[in-house]
């Protein structure tokens, strides 16, 4: 049990400093310094940590991250999303819970244009929730679809979280991004089926109201003006990767250029929006790179101290089988998701989970997608799910966290069901990467 002391010390210090409210990157840095002095030769280890910084963040796989952030921020700050919402609203027709379907369709489109769950939820929540409440929608039909649609950005490419996971876990970023396309669309269909079932069981949850009939010509024009150009952006980002025309880095640059072109064509371009988008991306990228630098050293110290190999030997000694281990890993993420954000969970769990995945010879793209879906659930689990707080922030005054969390529960169940389906039928995740 020589491994137990460094394992308990490293993991315990991380959780302790996070519990004190120390930012994630600094919690890792303090833990790293303690580990380096104890297990890595003192000041020599600190020098090694500093020299690792440039190598950790200088990888080509990380280049798409700031570009995807710029693309998503430009899209949301320019107002292009309003036109997409109007066009989808016009095309849905007079269905019961039509606004819930509009939110879901818009969430799928926006996920392929931004890669940010927080931005998706904030935008759709602020635009649609007041209107849905005014129309008499119950909480589960107003908040639930917004939270479900917002979380799609975790798996539908270009997912910023997938880029980060691929870089940290040394998974092919392009393959991981492509792998999320089919499960993301399947999840959107499952959400639509859930909304349909909810309206069947409780028709009063989404009262039907008369809607102006829109001529087909007007619908076609709205699609051509507001949705088809967005489809071009999706092709530039996702299609070029799938067809092998561009790498993820090149596709992210094409996406930025495409959004800029749309802003100019729609006369939405302003220098203020561009500067704000660059500032948004700089802040997130800077903190992310700092976290990655700290995480890289943490993984090295974790392995050098013997904690990693010792823990793997200990847990595999029980020999419960690979799928039980996979189940336990997902459960750990779901529990951590109640108390911390996705990046923190990723940094804590990957040094432990990846060696276990390698031991059982899991396909890393398949395994990475399962982790992403589990992280997605963490976005909407109380008491600290980030999307729950975003929704409470845009909901009418007096809306409780409990109300929002209960509205999200059926959509969480759909995501968990998708994880089970991917475990049983791995080709749901691997079909596109293997094909292209």
Image (spheres, helix red, strand yellow):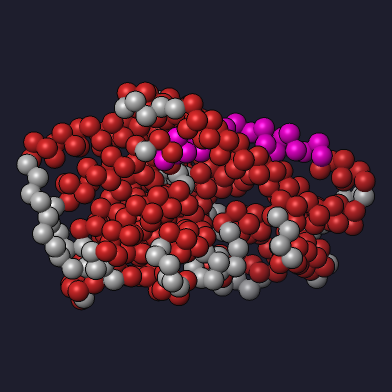
Q: Does residue 380 appear to the left or right of 4 in the view shown? A: left
Which part of the image, by quadrant, shows the N terminus? bottom right
Residue 57: where, in percent of width, then height?
A: 67, 36
Magenta-colored stretch includes residue 43: no
Quarter occupied by residue 132? bottom left
- Residue at left 64%, top 67%? 316
Q: Is residue 413 above or below residue 283?
A: below
Q: Is the magenta region chiefly helix, strand or loop?
A: helix
Residue 161: where, in percent of width, then height?
A: 52, 48
Q: Is residue 337 above or below residue 268?
A: below
The residue range painted magenta reads 50-76
- Residue at left 84%, top 56%? 35
Q: Is residue 207 visible?
A: yes
Q: Does residue 276 appear to the left or right of 424 in the view shown? A: right
Residue 82: where, in percent of width, then height?
A: 31, 42
- Residue at left 70%, top 43%? 290
Residue 331: where, in percent of width, then height?
A: 53, 70
Which part of the image, by quadrant, shows the C terminus? top left
Q: Is residue 240 above or below residue 416?
A: above
Quarter occupied by residue 231? top left
Decide which of 165, 232 is in the foreground and name it.
Answer: 232
């Amino acid at each position: 049990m020589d491994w137990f002391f460094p394992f308990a010390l490293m993991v315990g210090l991380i959780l302790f400093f996070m519990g004190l409210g120390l930012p994630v990157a600094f919690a890792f840095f303090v833990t790293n310094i303690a580990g380096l002095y104890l297990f890595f030769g003192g000041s020599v280890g600190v020098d090694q940590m500093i020299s690792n910084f440039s190598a950790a963040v200088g990888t080509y796989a990380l280049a798409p991250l700031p570009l995807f952030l710029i693309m998503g921020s430009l899209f949301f700050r320019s107002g292009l999303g309003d036109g997409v919402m109007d066009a989808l609203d016009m095309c849905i027709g007079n269905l019961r819970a039509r606004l819930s379907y509009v939110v879901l369709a818009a969430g799928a489109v926006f996920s392929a244009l931004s890669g940010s769950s927080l931005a998706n939820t904030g935008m759709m929540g602020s635009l649609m929730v007041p209107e849905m409440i005014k129309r008499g929608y119950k909480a589960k039909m107003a908040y639930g679809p917004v939270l479900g649609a917002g979380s799609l950005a975790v798996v539908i490419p270009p997912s910023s979280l997938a880029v980060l996971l691929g870089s940290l876990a040394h998974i092919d970023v392009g393959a991981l991004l492509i792998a999320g396309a089919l499960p993301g669309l399947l999840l959107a269909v499952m959400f639509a089926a859930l909304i349909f079932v909810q309206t069947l069981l409780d028709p009063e949850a989404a009262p039907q109201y008369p809607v102006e009939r829109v001529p087909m010509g007007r619908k076609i024009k709205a699609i051509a003006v507001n949705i088809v150009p967005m489809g071009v952006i999706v092709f530039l980002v996702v299609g070029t990767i799938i067809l092998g025309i561009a790498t993820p880095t090149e596709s992210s640059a094409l996406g930025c250029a495409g959004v800029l072109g749309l802003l100019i064509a729609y006369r939405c371009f302003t220098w203020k929006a561009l500067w704000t988008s660059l500032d948004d991306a700089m802040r997130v990228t800077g903190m992310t790179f700092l976290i990655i630098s700290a995480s890289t050293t943490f993984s090295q110290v974790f392995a050098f101290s013997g904690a990693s190999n010792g823990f793997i030997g200990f847990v595999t000694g029980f020999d419960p089988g690979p799928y039980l281990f996979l189940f336990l890993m997902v459960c750990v993420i779901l529990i951590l998701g109640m108390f911390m954000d996705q990046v923190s969970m990723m940094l804590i769990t990957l040094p432990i989970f990846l060696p276990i995945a390698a031991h059982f010879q899991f396909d890393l793209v398949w395994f990475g997608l399962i982790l992403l879906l589990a992280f997605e659930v963490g976005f909407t689990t109380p008491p600290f799910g980030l999307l729950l707080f975003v929704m409470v922030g845009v909901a009418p005054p007096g809306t409780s966290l409990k109300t929002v969390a209960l509205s999200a529960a059926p959509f969480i169940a759909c995501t968990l069901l998708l994880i089970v389906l991917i475990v049983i039928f791995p080709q749901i995740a691997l079909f596109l990467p293997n094909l292209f």
